């Protein structure tokens, strides 16, 4: 069932429960006017395209003047009698705080288009895919550190053309033994030998080796970092195989022959 507000001419859907709450009296959710819904029931709601314009104040005043001219005193008296019957009912009903308010416009509201939210969702999905691709491209090495992400990043780099560095966990590379001796050919030079082994469960890149020479008092006299191609004694493979020993041979200078100690530290190449 549908009813229309006499003040703003807005059509609402009403239920039998709303009609029975206060004897058919309801409150308009648009203009807050109180009216008798049963007296203005509509069996079929108006079409969405049909618009009804509420009468202006000037039109109402002009209509009242015409009625007074045509009807005379008898019409005025009848009008006063009608007002005395209606106004008390409105006043009495307005005192109740539980008058139902009709605000639903079901049945006369134009339904939303399906395609608008569909295209919005499609655009948001495309932006999310683009953002994920940018993160994978610019941070592929950082993401590949996680073993669960590495297969995904490797497959992505095969299509995107990015180069994935071998995994590197320096903490799992162990220096088995080191030795230092004067260089057999040159003065004020030292030859350092070292063996290292990868204790990780995966092959990883060769680390850099930082050599520090110290004096009697522990002061650093010289420091240099060697890349894998500079310290490997034999031609290196692509990566450091797990549990396979690799040997390193390093030639360093001894400033003024004062170096009495040394330190080897594995670093990221």
Image (cartoon, rainbow, N blue to C red):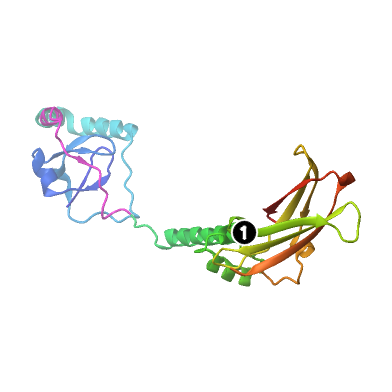
Where on the picture, by quarter, is residue 231? Answer: bottom right
- Which quadrant, please, contains the C terminus? bottom right
Task: Name which residue lies at 56% across and 59% down.
Answer: 143
Mark 1 — residue? 174
Q: Where 3 falls versus 178 (above or below)?
A: above
Coordinates of residue 96 in the picture (x, y in percent): 12, 30
Q: Where 257 falls versus 201 (above or below)?
A: above
Question: What's the magenta bit mostly, secondary-structure-wise?
Answer: loop
Coordinates of residue 174 in the picture (x, y in percent): 62, 59
Q: Nearer the viewer, residue 15 or 153?
A: 153
Residue 53 falls left or right of residue 184: left
Task: Name which residue lies at 62% across and 56% down.
Answer: 170
Task: Name which residue lies at 27% across and 43% down.
Answer: 9
Residue 162 falls left or right of residue 181: left
Where on the picture, by quarter, is residue 160? Answer: bottom right
Does the rendering let one see residue 262? Answer: yes
Residue 197 falls left or right of residue 1: right
Coordinates of residue 6 in the picture (x, y in percent): 23, 40
Per the rendered image, the range of residues in magenta is 89-109
């Amino acid at each position: 069932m549908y009813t229309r507000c006499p003040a703003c001419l807005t059509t609402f859907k009403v239920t039998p429960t709303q009609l029975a709450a206060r004897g058919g009296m309801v409150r308009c959710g648009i203009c807050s006017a109180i009216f008798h819904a049963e007296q203005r029931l509509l069996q079929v709601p108006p079409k969405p395209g049909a618009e009804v314009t509420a009468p202006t104040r000037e039109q109402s005043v002009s209509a009242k003047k015409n009625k007074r001219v045509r009807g005379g005193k008898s019409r005025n008296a009848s009008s006063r009698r009608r007002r005395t019957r209606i106004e008390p009912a409105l006043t009495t009903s307005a005192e109740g705080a539980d008058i139902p308010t009709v605000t639903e416009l079901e049945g006369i509201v134009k339904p939303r288009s399906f395609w608008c939210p569909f295209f919005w969702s499609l655009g948001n999905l495309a932006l999310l895919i683009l953002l994920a691709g940018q993160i994978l491209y610019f941070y592929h090495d950082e993401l590949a550190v996680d073993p669960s992400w590495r297969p995904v990043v490797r497959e992505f780099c095969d299509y995107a053309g990015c180069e994935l560095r071998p995994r590197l966990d320096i903490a799992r590379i162990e220096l088995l033994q080191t030795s230092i001796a004067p260089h057999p050919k040159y003065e004020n030079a030292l030859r350092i030998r070292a063996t290292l082994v990868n204790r990780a469960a995966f092959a990883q890149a060769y680390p850099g080796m930082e050599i520090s020479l110290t004096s009697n008092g522990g002061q650093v006299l010289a420091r240099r970092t060697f890349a894998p191609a500079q310290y490997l004694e034999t031609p290196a493979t692509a990566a450091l195989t797990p549990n396979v020993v690799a040997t390193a041979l390093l030639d360093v200078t001894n400033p003024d022959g004062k170096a009495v100690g040394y330190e080897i530290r594995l670093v990221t190449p």
